[in-house]
Amino acid sequence: MRAGSAPTAVATMSALRESVRNTSEIMTHALPTLSLFGMPLAHVDENALLDHMFGELSHARGGWLVTANLDHLHRYANDPALRTLYADADVIVADGMPLVWASQVLGSPLPERVAGSALIYRFAERAAREGRSLYLLGGELGAAEGAASVLCERSPGLRIAGCSSPRVHTPATAAELAEIRAELTRTRPDLVLVGLGSPKQEHLIAALRADFPAAWMVGVGISFSFVSGGVARAPAWMRRTGLEWTHRLSQEPRRLARRYLLNDLPFVFRLFAHAAGRRIRDRP
């Protein structure tokens, strides 16, 4: 053995052990998933998701959470560019009863629907309890501030790092990104809730997340308006039975008719056929 080779070998073995340790740690924190059209949906309920996210925050690790409904899955299945975009998300959950039903057809039922419009309240409760902060980004003018007020009233002690409703293109311009990046750098939130609608909010998160590795970023769509009272949410029975989309359609028929009736509704049948076919093929 040449002089100096032993220390080199020791250093190499040490590096390998460190690599294995880091890989093991990452695997320990991974969530179980099931696949629909290749989209990996986390097999978790709300409580398990919150435990995962806030557990990661305790280790100064953030991430990107996507709450995927039928429209998200439809675009994922048909648009390669969006499939690539969503592939960078750390966790994707089923925010839509058709996705939950399809998992049942597949034979691997998801525990429950994990809706972004409900998670926003749970984030606030958990953040208040653990001394974490929220930043509300996007929404209609005044909706983020209104939502922040409601959340603080419901969860005393909650820290709101800030609120803003900037104009953002799809994708965001360099100037828009610089302004938002500067604001988040100044306020240093633990969770950034982005209410810009999909896929605009996902494009923005993808562009920003590398700059804030210790924060969780979540697209919440119209949730700020739900929380602030600017838009009425569907009754609980409609949410449970998967009919929330009809309530939203009645509120914004001109904007949502094409998406819901011409794109998403036919896709439901394709989704169930896909799940049933996979179950048959995977049968021992």
Image: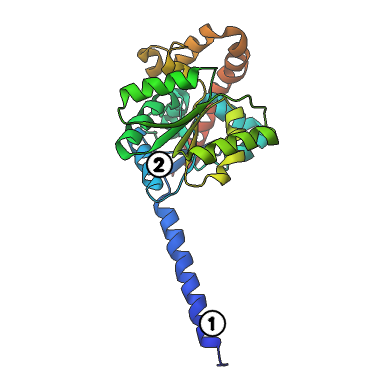
Q: CA distance from mark 1 to mark 2?
A: 39 Å
The kind of residue on which mark 1 rests is: Thr
Q: Amino acid at mark 2?
A: Met
Q: Residue at x 39, y 33 (%)?
A: 110
Expressed as whole percent of the image width and height from the top left, the position of residue 161 reads: 45, 33
Residue at the image point whose x is 56% and y is 9% from the top: 252
Visual colour scheme: rainbow
Asked if the residue under mark 2 is in contact with the one under mark 1, i.e. CB atoms within 8 Å, the reply is no
Residue 183 versus residue 248: which sits nearer the camera? 183
For the N terminus, which image quadrant?
Answer: bottom right
Q: Is residue 192 visible?
A: yes
Residue 283 in sight: no
Q: Does residue 192 lie above or below 222 as drawn?
A: below
Q: Residues within 10 Å of mark 2 (few under 14, many from 20)?
A: many
Which residue bears the numbered disc 2? 53
Is 159 on the left or on the right of 175, as rendered? Answer: left
In the foreground, 186 or 143: 186
Q: Quadrant of residue 256?
A: top right
Q: Is residue 68 left or right of residue 261?
A: left
Q: Percent position (x, y) of residue 51?
A: 34, 41
Rendered position, 39 above or below 139: below
Q: Is residue 56 left or right of residue 40?
A: left
Packing grade of label 1 (10 A; few <14, some 14-19, many >=20) is: few
Whichever of callouts 1 and 2 sits on the residue coming sooner in the sequence is 1
- In the rendered image, the residue lying farthest to the front is 186
SS of the residue under disc 1: helix
Q: Secondary structure at mark 2?
A: helix
Q: Which mark is residue 8?
A: 1
Give coordinates of residue 40: x percent, y percent: 50, 40
Q: Which circle marks residue 58 in the picture? A: none
Of residues 22 and 268, the one drawn nearer to the viewer in this rendering: 22
* Quadrant containing the C terminus in the rendered view: top left
